[in-house]
Each structure stands twice: as structure tokens, then as C-alpha cells.
Amino acid sequence: MSRLVVVSNRVADPRKTAAGGLAVALAEVLNNTGGLWFGWSGRIVEDGGQPSLHTQHAGPVTLVTADLGQSDHAAYYVGYSNGVLWPVFHYRLDLADFDDGYIAGYRRVNQQFARQLAPLLREDDIIWVHDYHLIPLAAELRALGCTQRIGFFLHIPLPPPLILAAIPGHDWLIRALFAYDVVGFQAEADLLHFDNYVAAEAHAQPVGEHRWRAFNRTVQAGAYPIGIDVDEFQGLAQAHEGREMFERMRREYSRRKLLVGVDRLDYSKGLPQRLKAFRALLTRYPETHRSATLIQIASPSREDVSAYTDILHELESLCGSINGNFGELDWMPVRYMHRTVARPRLPGLYRASRVALVTPLRDGMNLVAKEFIAAQDPADPGVLVLSRFAGAAEQLKEALMVNPYDVEGTANAIHLALQMPVEERRVRHESLMATIRQYDVHWWCNAFLDTLAQAESAESGTPWLRL
Ligand SMILES: O=P(O)(O)OC[C@H]1O[C@H](O[C@H]2O[C@H](CO)[C@@H](O)[C@H](O)[C@H]2O)[C@H](O)[C@@H](O)[C@@H]1O
Ligand SMILES: O=c1ccn([C@@H]2O[C@H](COP(=O)(O)OP(=O)(O)O)[C@@H](O)[C@H]2O)c(=O)[nH]1
């Protein structure tokens, strides 16, 4: 049987838990299949030093991680990945920093990773590359003579062609995707944008359903919405830490209805808009005073990118003003925490909450939405308020759908969620549960890898990948 080689910027010990949906999902996949996981070590070394490789064995998984030089990290991770690709792919051209120097660093790190990974590969390996940090990796591997099957999965949204076209060098990026055999997206909307882009901008020829030929290569595209390991998550809810957290929360908030938000502190997650909607709820529905409390966890993220520090200040000031204006001696409307909560504690928090607010302005998928559903008591489940702009909205139709830019509309939906009778909550939850069970992390992995296994082996060499 072929060995699975997973490559992603973020690598986590699969026996431990991590914040960030990608690391959580890949740890679950690799724990089941075994294989090699290659990526960045998280260490930044001085420029000019030899970037070392570290090998670690974690159960059935071998982790191989590479250090990055200081300027490479700045250009590849902070600059190009999170200063250009992240904002543009999340439709935020206003936040993109199109600095000329970043793309060379991005290319350099992808070349470095390809050179370090190639000697570790076996002929019949199946290679699965993840996310926007590593778009040119397959082209670099092919240039080194690798002919293995290589698939790519984009965890974030792909915007429409005209937004994509704002990136200087967008044609180079999309051309690099043709070095893969299979390219996967989270949502049908992203797949449509890919099809439209390659037909119009790359003049690719259709050779099957979502199958395109251009640059002497054929690529199969598809939508594979990522899921969670429902049993694993429910197991966490039943474990000691999960139960203890649930009981503590229930005790602490016995007289109130809890609302919960769990996000990385990222401008794509719509946190200021969410806080404004909560403020509108308190203004418009005075009966919610003293009876509703919002717990918002904002896990620190990418603090070396300036747009992230701006959002931190905005959020702190909104929470302060809501508590200042509405708070009472015995009631704080918002409990805001700028810290990561260990994953085993989340199911208890979700289960004790009547409403989850998952209201991103744009999100590839959003695994918190699925975790919230998995953690509920089916006899008395909470309600998911979900942004129509999260990838998850294509699947989770029975959630209360909102437009996060519409603050008043979101406040009304939250009010509806708080009032929803138990019968309706049960019906909605049952359907949502069936969906997340059917399309779980195992489905995601198998659907993608089955397509990749059926792809023909690749031709080597990509002389066209020049910046
Ligand atoms: O690695 P970081 O820079 O600390 O960021 C954490 C991860 O954020 C993004 O997650 C995405 O993947 C999730 C799982 O598919 C998806 O549910 C979510 O909507 C996405 O935002 C990013 O894409 C990952 O590469 C990061 O590791
Ligand atoms: O304080 C936190 C915040 C988030 N998470 C986990 O991080 C993941 C976030 O994934 P999601 O797809 O929602 O968004 P991303 O952060 O990947 O954009 C989920 O598994 C959360 O349970 C966590 O363990 N602790």
C-alpha cells in the first residue's frame, strides 16, 4: 500500500491537541493512516545559517519539520501568505500588502521545502499538500524529478477571478496549481471560481467534469468540504475534563442563557460585527439583560501581521463599552478572553451554551460550527447561528443563517435562537448531526484520496515555473 505523505505549513504532534482547524484535521487523518507529515518546525533561525530538519516519531506518524531563516519567514509566512494571499482569498483587497519582496521569499521557502522533502520520498508515495502557503510546492518537486501523484487542498476560500486577478503574479500562482494531479476546495462556490478563472484567464480546455488541461498538464478539481471526527469530539465531551467543564459552566450560569464564540483572533471571523450584533440585541430586547451572557474566546493568531493588532484593539474597546454600558454588579454581558482554550475543554463549554455564534465575514469551512453541533445534548440542544459566508453554510442548512454585515438582522436571529422552543431545536439539531456524521473527517480524507489514487501518474519536469 502507498504511504501517505502530508505537507502543510503548520505541523502538530497528532497525539496532542492544537488550535487551528487544519492542524486538528490532519492530526486526525494521520493518526488513522500513519505516514509522514512534513512542514515548518515553528522555529525561526538567523539568516545565513543552515536550516535544520528535525525528525520525531509520534505513534504511527513520522514528523519531519524544517526551520526557517528570519527573512524567509518574514517574506513567506508573514508577508506573502498572511499579508497577500490570506486577505485577498478572504475578499479583503483593502488589507493586502502587495510588497514586491514577498513573492521571492515565498518561492524560496517552497524551493527549500521541496529540496528537503524530495530525498525522503518513495516512488509510490501519495503526496497531499495543504493550503495557500504551499501552492508552488508541487511545481518545485516536479522540477526536481518527482513523478508521484500529488494532490492539493485549499483550506481557505478561493475568490472570484476578478478579485484573484488583483494579485500581481496571479497567473503564476494558478499555473503552479497545474503541477498537481488533483486540486480540492472546501465549497462548491470556490470550485466554481476556479473553473471560471482557468477557463477565462488561463484558457484551459475542459476535458471532463471539473477536469482541465493547460500548460501541458491535466488537473482534476473538486469540492471536498472538510469535517470533524464526530466520535472523537463526543469522546472529549464525555471525558473527565469535558464533563467537569460542562458542570462548572452550568453551575456558574444556572440563571442565564450562555452564548459562545470560539475563534482565532482574525479579521475574517467577523468579531467586531458579532459584538455589535450582541450590543444591538441588548439594546432592542431589554429582557435579555441579566439573562444572556456571551463568552467570546479569541485565540491569539499571527500577531506579527499589523491587521491583526488593529482588530485586537477594536475588539477590546467594544467589549469594554458593552460591559460599561450594560453591565450590572451581578452581571457582565460579555466575558472576553484573548487566549487559546485547550481543545478538550471546548466540548463542555459548547454543551453548556444555548447559542453558538459562528459569524465570519468569510471562512473556508469553520470547524467550530461542526464541533458545536457534535457536543450538544440531543434532548436539549443549543442553536447554531451561522454566517452565510462560512464554507460550512453550504452544508449546515438547518442553522439560523445570518448576514454578519447586517448587525440588526443578526441581533434578531440571536433573539430567535434564544427563544427557540425545544422541539424546533431538536429537529434542527437532528438534521445537522446527520450531515456532520455523513461528511466527517474520514469522508473528507477518503473522498480526496480516492480521487488522487485514480489520477494517472504525473510527467516530471515543469520548465514553465519561472517567476
Ligand atoms: O497556522 P496559523 O497561521 O496559526 O493559522 C491556523 C490555520 O488557519 C486556517 O484554517 C483554515 O482551515 C480550517 C480547516 O480546513 C477551516 O475550517 C478554516 O475555515 C480555515 O480558515 C488556515 O487555512 C490554516 O492553514 C492555518 O493553519
Ligand atoms: O481557543 C481555541 C480556539 C480554537 N480551537 C480549535 O481550533 C480549530 C479552529 O478551526 P476553524 O476551522 O474553526 O478555524 P481556523 O482557526 O482554522 O480558521 C477548532 O478545531 C477549534 O476547536 C481551540 O482548540 N482553542
Image (cartoon, rainbow, N blue to C red):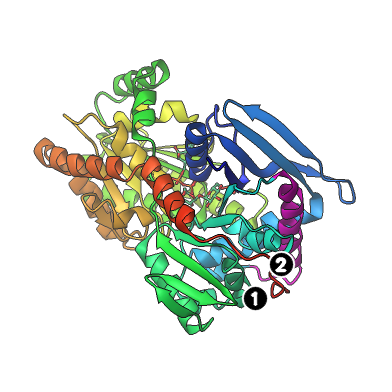
Give the class, few, some or many, for how many residues have Cα within 10 Å of label 1's Cα (few <14, many ≥20).
Answer: few
Residue in the image at 51% along x and 32% along y: 31
Please state which amino acid type lies under the numbered disc 2.
Ile
Residue in the image at 55% along x and 27% along y: 15
Asked if the stretch drawn in magenta spans residue 53, the answer is no
**Label placed on residue 391:** none
| Residue 87: percent from left, percent from top | 55, 63
| Residue 290: percent from left, percent from top | 27, 34
150 with respect to 75 (left or right): left
Label 2: which residue?
Answer: 103
Question: What is the secondary structure assignment of the residue under circle 2?
Answer: helix
The part of the image, by quadrant, that contains residue 103 is bottom right
When the figure is inspected, residue 38 is found, relative to residue 90, above or below; the finding is above
When the figure is inspected, residue 101 is found, relative to residue 60, above or below; the finding is below
| Residue 25: percent from left, percent from top | 47, 41
Task: Tell me if label 1 and label 2 are in contact, CB under 8 Å.
Answer: yes
Label 1: which residue?
Answer: 169
Give the class, few, some or many, for how many residues have Cα within 10 Å of label 2's Cα (few <14, many ≥20).
Answer: some
Please state which amino acid type lies under the numbered disc 1.
Gly
Which of marks 2 and 1 precedes in the sequence? Answer: 2
Quarter holding the C terminus is bottom right
Q: Which region of the structure is painted magenta?
A: 97-120
Point out the residue furthest to the right here: 48
Q: How many marks?
A: 2
Name the foreground residue: 126 vs 23: 126
Is residue 400 visible to the viewer in this orientation of the structure?
Answer: yes
105 with respect to 430 (left or right): right
| Residue 179: percent from left, percent from top | 60, 66
Residue in the image at 76% along x and 68% along y: 101
Question: What is the secondary structure assignment of the residue under circle 1?
Answer: loop
Residue in the image at 27% along x and 49% along y: 281
When the figure is inspected, residue 257 is found, relative to residue 315, above or below; the finding is above
